[in-house]
Image (spheres, rainbow, N blue to C red):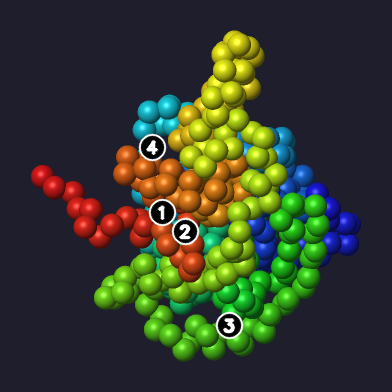
Amino acid sequence: MNIDTSDRRQLKQSSNVLLLAPLTPTGNRACLELLASTTPPHETNVAAVTYTPPPETWIADWKAHVEDFPAELAFIHANTVEKSGEDASTELPSDVSVARVDPNQPMDIIAPLSEQLTRWKGNGNQTVVSVQTLTVLLEYVNFDTAFRYLHILTHRVQAADAIGFYHMDPDIHDEETVNTLKTLFDAVVEVSDDGEEWSVAETYGDRSVTSDHVQSHDTDVSVPESESGLFTSIRDSLSGVFSGESGSDSPSAAGRSDSPRASEDGESSPSAVQSGANSGVDDLPEEAMLTDEDRIRELLTQYGGRMKQADVTEETDWSKSTVSRKLSKMEEKGLVTRVQVGRGNLVFLSGYEPETAKSPFEQETD
């Protein structure tokens, strides 16, 4: 982690910190490392608010990137999707609690989080709150609802003498959205796409601006039912997500034309197949034994269950049209869900999609 001593001291003196980092494994690692930057993990209480990744995934990532386990750990998991099969068989440590709430009702997060903060008060450890991520939160609710919720949450964190870290991908949101949310935080940490460069800046935003924004709207925090629904919220909050896309295929894809999977349809050439037949299955790399659908599902899993379709193209050696066809077939099988935002799509692994991504016509029948 490239945060110097003065920056660490500044973060420790802050109550609420906004982390601007990509919605990628690199950004996820940065979020976890930031949690451990102010106090040694064995002296830290961590309350993690999670959305698409389940608590089991969060713990696995923490162990991989931070190693030392927090002294106390609790989750508020904002996802109503029940896991089954292999995922359900993974057990959490007995001393780790999980409160499950409806992601469409962010105010439901406040009560269990407040109870946890009260429970830890005076236990001698530094309490840290992690929200991963505001980007996903804004896929469930409109901006005004999210702003009022965060206004209350940041004050609760401050009152508990805790430190809150809130992850957000700045490339998915327009500049006005990011700048408005900055007024809620004491400091902003920006991380480069490769995770190598970090910068910390004080904001100590004008709270009168925050108050004016809250007072200019109805204080009812329930999600309003409107004709446009939450799809409009997604489009409004994430407009411009793909504004920086290039019209050509990614250099990384073009640079691997000699790959056995470099054909337009992503299939191996006859010569590559013949070569593989001569070498034996045990000598093949693990990736070569995956089907195309398995490869996409593995990518989505690495990205926490969701990623931009443009990133799927960059991470594979397929063209944009090939990726689109493969994802369409996977959608038909119910393996993934795509949500159009701006000029492109967000791709969700089945079981990780926000409820707003589901068709309004998908109703349970007796």
Q: Secondary structure at mark 1?
A: strand
Residue 319, image x, y percentages: 55, 48
- Please give the name of the residue rendered at 28% of the width and 73% of the height, measured from the top-left corner: 225
Q: Secondary structure at mark 2?
A: strand
Q: Quadrant of residue 263?
A: top right
Residue 23 drawn above or below residue 92:
below
Q: Secondary structure at mark 3?
A: helix
Of residue 84 and residue 125, the one placed in the foreground of this image is 84
Amino acid type at circle 2 is Asn
Residue beneath label 2, please?
345
Q: Secondary structure at mark 4?
A: loop
- Please give the name of the residue rendered at 68% of the width and 51% of the height, measured from the top-left corner: 251
Q: Is residue 126 visible?
A: no
Mark seen at residue 282: none
Residue beneath label 1, please?
338
In the orientation shown, which residue stands out farthest toward the left? Answer: 366
